[in-house]
Amino acid sequence: MLLLRLKHVDASLLVEVGRALVTSLSIPVIVSERLDVALACGAAGVHLTSASMPIAAVRPQVSTSFLIGGSVSSATDLRSVEQADYVTIGPVFGAGVGAGVGAGGAALGVDGFRRLALASGRPVVAIGGLTSTSAAEIYRAGASGVAVIREVFGATDPESAARLLGAAIPAG
């Protein structure tokens, strides 16, 4: 899955980029915080944070096949994601990258992640300071996936970094 997150780009360019990704990739494209853009570019879904539209307001307006993700950084956030298809939980090890992703919050650690993952009752994606080394441990703690930026895009060899992350995914 790929999350399209370009916060400071106007809607028309975001739709153009979204359409290009949707038509050229064979994986689901999710748009961050912009339901209008997600619908306009034919994305598989939208990821909403505490700073965007409430999930409960969006769910009745879209088809059941349209994915809605939400962000969790504490047990109090769980109520806002009850109608989400998946949730991101973090920051696990380091600071999150945006509102609703544990921005400015303390790292949860593996045990904090595990507690929230179990309590969420849905597929969870870990975010915040994850590496190819820590990914295996996070999968064992209940993650369905990991979200990374720095680990891949900050690497001297992004393809190798992505392959190392892929190798951490449990078989089956």
Image (tube, grey):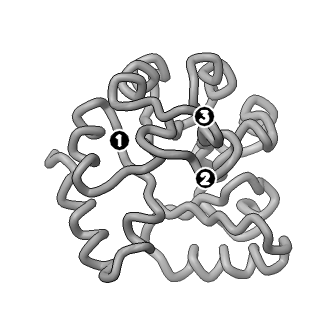
Q: Which amino acid, mark 3? A: Gly
Q: In the figure, is residue 95 to the left or right of 158?
A: right
Tell me the residue that label 2 is attached to: 97
Q: Verify CB contact (< 8 Å) between mark 2 and mark 3.
A: no
Where's residue 31, x and y in %?
66, 60
Closer to us: 127 or 36: 127
Mark found first going from the N terminus, 2 or 3 = 2
Q: Which quarter of the figure has residue 34?
A: bottom right
Quadrant occupied by the N terminus: bottom left
Instruction: Identify the residue at image location x=44%, y=74%.
Output: 153
Tell me the residue that label 3 is attached to: 105
Return the mark for residue 144.
1
Q: Which amino acid, mark 1? A: Ser
The 10 Å Cα crowd at callout 1, few under 14, some 14 to 19, many 20 or more, is some
Where's residue 4, x and y in %?
61, 65
Q: Is mark 1 on a helix, strand or loop?
A: loop
Q: Distance between the residues labelled 2 and 3?
A: 11 Å
Of the two numbered discs 1 and 3 in the rendering, the one whose residue sits closer to the viewer: 3
Q: Is mark 2 on a helix, strand or loop?
A: loop
Mark found first going from the N terminus, 1 or 2 = 2
The 10 Å Cα crowd at callout 2, few under 14, some 14 to 19, many 20 or more, is some
Instruction: Identify the residue at image location x=27%, y=47%.
Output: 134
